[in-house]
Image (cartoon, rainbow, N blue to C red):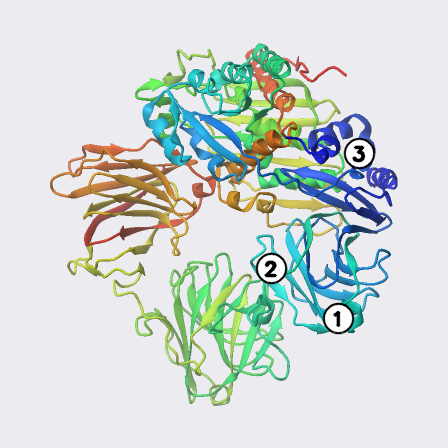
């Protein structure tokens, strides 16, 4: 169901940002200005409800599909019965399947939310789209460059909507930073520092909980930190629209952590630090670790006259610093962008409700979501190459582009 | 600047282009933007932008739109009942405050203290009736009133003409959404609007405000005043409370992160002179200090400073000051008005100081505080203390009592629908919260706030365990119907708060696990949020003991 507004006037954030990247802000705004003439309504409100299937009763139970006025949870699935029950209760859904493979055969389902383990994301996403259904997956999009290509091919072949549920994209600080860029307040982001620390130290309950289930290793067991880069990379790709083109990365291999031996991924590292260059020549320092005494998913962005610092675990408040002007410490609340039933607290800086609604509306409005397949891969692949660089002692490596050829 | 110049240059292309939805830019540029939902973005050219929507037309009724100003905006808002060329109409704007103007810019009404900042979203509304208009400013939820004018009389011929809606901004970008005209305003005229709750000033008011604070009544009954600005120093003087050689009392609650707060007594009209009974020292764990009051224009002098650790943020306390000829003293009490937490000795001062008549005033430093219990001339006692003693809060309809003087077991005896109690002495975030529960439909509250609107509740039924997240609309986040209660009826309940997740375990007294949830993903705001431990009973008697909190290492 496509309204004239939706088909003719949609100036997506990606279109705007990519336009800005290629030809400067002016060109992007021209495009936007030309389309304003047809902006028939401010909000295309639709009564249509998509029927979604939710797979994965761990993290997958922390979204708000049942609260979205444009969504009905048709069925759920998890291999584990207790998690399946939890999904049914959370989403008030009476129908469940024992596996994703069975769920995607349900003709009533038009979209599937895949919250399985990272190594399964591509296999599951491809299966979902091959079944003719729209797909949203947890991060990362993939764990190899080959998988990135497979994912894009499946999306393009099936012409379904694909979104990666990247939480950093909808942290309030990211939303504000996108507005600052779009408003022309920030200008070029010359240098950024992005970091994701989630401590799971040896002997900690956190490690026991994340790395093992029923005594067996989970997919998170000694997972390479840079294979989970998107909470960091979205702070650049998802904010300015730039693409990373080169990376050099160092890794730290712990000497006294026997649990890291016999790694399923042959990963020696618990901490990785990457330097990345963007297609506009800007620089980013990206830190990933599960071993440091630190806990953050944040960024700080530096321009020539403006800098923005996200709040940090160490006590840094969110602040916009402008040359010659007083600091701005805004109250960050963008809940007004959501329909009232979704204005509830949610995970990862209240981002889950935004992800929920963005995916639902992308399907309803027949448009690409904010973190579409190209953005998802552009946020995932730099980490895969960064890990390769770390294994080669920090060698500077090119990051391939997966964007469509112009 | 060069980049902005390029933007403005390109924006000229769109200015004045009529759009099929009726939007037309008078100056500046109008764009469509999306962040989850669509918004109109109005960008100034040569410092100003106006755009008219000719599809939203009418005369009387309620006109409104949501506005989110960006950095640099000097003033922004919307026109209602406006002529197409903006030579007629009313303007509802955010500028230094919140303001109603006519088309010529003449101010018809202003709330200069209405506060807003860039990137906050507000719903602005203008209401037109024959011969009068009014405006109001609400939070984006379209319910919470922030500021409201009374009716402003205008010539009747102005309100009877058809007009349209327009949006405007100066010096910065504004995002707009939900522009419309309706028959009914979002909120009716009320005497209890926040701007009307501000402590009135002027010759007819008993209050006088000094400094840069934002003083308002905290309740509709106008019994509590609150200073809520993050400002250096703020004073509110009550000219209705006057005297000397008396007991001056008020209750106080210091907001988190404030530097201190206190009660001044026997001060003059400028809040100078007299004495200052002050909660100062280390913020949140400070001491009672008695000052010879300075005031806005003078520096005070400490007469006595008590031991630290006597007051804490968000704690209801009572301040008391007293003078007699040649003497002054101050006391910090619990809200029962009897239990002394800290006190100064009687301190000798010159008789002209102790004998001088003056007013009561309140003072905050680097943050906010609430004051109450001063209405009848400073002798009103605060709310009765908890029957369980200091550090315990009772919520709901229960009947709570200690089983013995040892205070190690609490019993709830009433047939209560929703009985809860909290101990504010136990505070924490991530870690393991634990207590022993006996009784059906009873359980452990953990990481809970005082209002029981945040935190978790694990309730044990006969054969069920339910875990609730108090901040969520549906609340139930995990449930097990396979739980088997031990024969003794007593069950050890553990709530475990970890990074982004919460889980519960039920154990027998010898440590056998009866039930255990897998971790449930929750909002990461819980990772650092400080909450308390408590108990809940839903329906009948229950006992609680062996409560502990072990922070995550």
Determine the CA span between mark 3 and mark 1.
40 Å
- Left/right placement of residue B458 relative to residue B306 reads left
Q: Nearer the viewer, residue A399 or B64?
A: B64
Answer above or below: position of A329 versus B10.
below
Q: Nearer the viewer, residue B170 or B494?
A: B170
Indicate which label's residue lies in the foreground, 3 or 2. 2
Q: Earlier in the sequence, mark 2 or mark 1?
A: 1
Write down the residue under mark 2. Answer: B186
**Residue situated furthest left in the rendering:** B487
Answer above or below: position of B108 versus A284.
below
Answer above or below: position of B244 versus A195.
below
Write down the residue under mark 1. Answer: B108
Which quadrant would residue B110 be assigned to in this image?
bottom right
- Residue in the image at 72% along x and 71% along y: B130
Indicate which label's residue lies in the foreground, 2 or 1. 2
Percent x, y of residue B496? 33, 38
What is the chain letter for disc 2? B
Write down the residue under mark 3. Answer: A25
Percent x, y of residue B277? 46, 74
Determine the CA span between mark 3 and mark 2.
39 Å
Q: Nearer the viewer, residue B274 or B480?
A: B480
- Residue in the image at 77% along x and 44% along y: B21
Instruction: Say which element carries label 3.
Output: helix
Indicate which label's residue lies in the foreground, 3 or 1. 1
What is the chain letter for disc 3? A
Instruction: Say which element carries label 2.
Output: loop
Percent x, y of residue B480? 28, 35
């Amino acid at each position: 169901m496509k309204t004239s507004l939706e088909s003719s006037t949609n100036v997506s954030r990606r279109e705007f940002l990519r336009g800005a990247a290629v030809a400067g802000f002016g060109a992007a705004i021209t495009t936007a200005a030309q389309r304003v003439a047809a902006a028939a309504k401010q909000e295309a409100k639709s009564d249509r409800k998509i029927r979604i299937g939710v797979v994965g009763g761990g993290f997958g139970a922390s979204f708000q599909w049942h609260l979205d006025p444009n969504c009905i949870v048709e069925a759920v699935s998890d291999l584990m019965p207790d998690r399946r029950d939890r999904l049914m209760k959370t989403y008030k859904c009476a129908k469940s399947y024992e596996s994703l493979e069975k769920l995607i055969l349900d003709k009533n389902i038009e979209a599937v939310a895949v919250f399985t383990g990272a190594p399964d994301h591509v296999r599951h996403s491809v299966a979902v789209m091959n079944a003719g259904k729209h797909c949203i997956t947890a991060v990362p999009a993939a764990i190899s460059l080959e998988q990135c290509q497979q994912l894009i091919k499946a999306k393009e072949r099936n012409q379904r909507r694909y979104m990666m549920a990247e939480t950093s994209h909808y942290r309030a600080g990211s939303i504000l930073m996108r507005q600052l860029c779009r408003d022309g307040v920030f200008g070029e982001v010359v240098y950024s520092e992005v970091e994701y620390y989630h401590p799971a130290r040896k002997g900690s309950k956190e490690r026991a909980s994340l790395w093992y289930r029923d005594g067996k290793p989970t997919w998170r067991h000694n997972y390479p930190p840079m294979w989970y880069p998107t909470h960091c990379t979205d702070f650049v790709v998802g904010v300015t629209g730039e693409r990373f083109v080169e990376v050099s990365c160092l890794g730290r291999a712990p000497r006294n952590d026997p649990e890291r031996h016999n790694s399923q991924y042959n990963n020696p590292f618990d901490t990785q630090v990457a330097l990345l260059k963007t297609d506009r020549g800007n620089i980013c320092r990206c830190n990933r670790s599960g071993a440091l005494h630190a806990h953050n998913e944040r960024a700080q962005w530096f321009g020539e006259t403006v800098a923005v610092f996200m709040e940090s675990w160490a006590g840094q408040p969110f602040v916009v610093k402008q040359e010659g002007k007083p600091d701005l410490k805004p109250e960050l609340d963008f809940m007004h962008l959501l329909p009232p039933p979704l204005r509830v607290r949610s995970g990862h800086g209240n981002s889950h409700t935004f992800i929920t609604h963005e995916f639902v509306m992308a399907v309803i409005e027949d448009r690409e979501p904010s973190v579409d397949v190209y953005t998802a891969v552009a946020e995932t692949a730099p980490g895969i190459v960064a890990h390769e660089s770390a294994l080669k002692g920090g060698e500077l490596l090119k990051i391939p582009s997966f964007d469509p050829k112009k | 600047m060069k980049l902005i110049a390029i933007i403005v240059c390109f924006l000229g292309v769109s200015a004045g282009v009529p759009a099929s939805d009726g939007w037309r830019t008078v100056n500046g540029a109008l764009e469509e933007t999306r962040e989850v939902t669509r918004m109109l973005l109005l960008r100034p050219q040569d410092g100003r932008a106006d755009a008219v929507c000719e599809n939203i037309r009418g005369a009387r009724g309620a006109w409104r739109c949501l506005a989110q100003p960006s950095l640099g905006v000097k003033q922004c808002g919307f026109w209602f009942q406006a002529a197409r060329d903006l030579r007629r109409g009313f303007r509802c704007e955010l500028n230094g405050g919140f303001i109603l103007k006519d088309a010529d810019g003449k101010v018809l009404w202003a709330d200069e203290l209405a506060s807003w900042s860039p990137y906050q979203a507000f719903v602005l509304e203008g209401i037109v009736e024959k011969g009068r208009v009014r405006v109001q400013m609400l939070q984006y939820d379209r319910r919470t009133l922030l500021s409201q004018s009374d009716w402003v009389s205008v010539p009747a011929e102005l309100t009877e003409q058809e007009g349209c809606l327009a949006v405007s901004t100066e010096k910065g970008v504004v995002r707009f959404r939900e522009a419309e005209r309706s028959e009914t305003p979002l909120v009716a005229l009320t005497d209890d609007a926040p701007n009307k709750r501000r402590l009135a000033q002027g010759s007819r008011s008993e209050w006088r405000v000094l400094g840069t604070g934002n003083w308002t009544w905290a309740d509709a009954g106008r019994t509590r005043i609150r200073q809520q600005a993050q400002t250096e120093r703020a004073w509110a003087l009550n000219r209705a409370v006057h005297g000397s050689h008396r007991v001056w009392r008020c209750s106080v609650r210091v907001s988190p992160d404030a530097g201190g707060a206190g009660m001044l007594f026997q001060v003059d009209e400028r809040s100078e002179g007299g004495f200052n009974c002050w909660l100062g020292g280390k913020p949140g764990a400070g001491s009672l200090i008695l000052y010879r009051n300075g005031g806005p224009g003078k520096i005070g002098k400490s007469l006595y400073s008590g031991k630290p650790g006597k007051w804490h943020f968000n704690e209801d306390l009572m301040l008391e000051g007293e003078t007699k000829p040649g003497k002054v003293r101050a006391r910090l009490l619990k809200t029962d008005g009897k239990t002394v937490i800290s006190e100064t000795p009687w301190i000798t001062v010159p008789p002209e100081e102790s004998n001088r008549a003056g007013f009561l005033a309140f003072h905050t430093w680097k943050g906010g505080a609430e004051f109450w219990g001063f209405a009848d001339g400073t002798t009103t006692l605060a709310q009765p203390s908890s029957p369980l003693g200091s550090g315990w809060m009772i919520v709901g309809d229960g009947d709570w009592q200690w089983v013995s003087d040892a205070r190690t077991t609490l019993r709830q005896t009433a047939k209560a629908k929703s009985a809860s109690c909290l101990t504010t002495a136990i505070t924490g975030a991530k870690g393991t919260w634990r207590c022993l529960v006996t009784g059906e439909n009873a359980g452990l509250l953990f990481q809970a706030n005082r209002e029981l609107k945040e935190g978790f509740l694990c309730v044990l039924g006969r054969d069920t365990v339910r875990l609730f997240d108090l901040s969520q609309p549906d609340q139930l986040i995990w449930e097990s119907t396979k739980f088997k209660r031990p024969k003794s009826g007593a069950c050890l309940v553990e709530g475990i708060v970890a990074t982004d997740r919460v889980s519960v375990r039920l154990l027998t007294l010898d440590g056998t696990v009866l039930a255990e949830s897998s971790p449930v993903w929750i909002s990461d705001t819980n990772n650092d949020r400080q909450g308390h431990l408590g108990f809940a009973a839903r329906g009948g008697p229950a006992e609680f003991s062996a409560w502990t909190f072990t922070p995550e290492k």
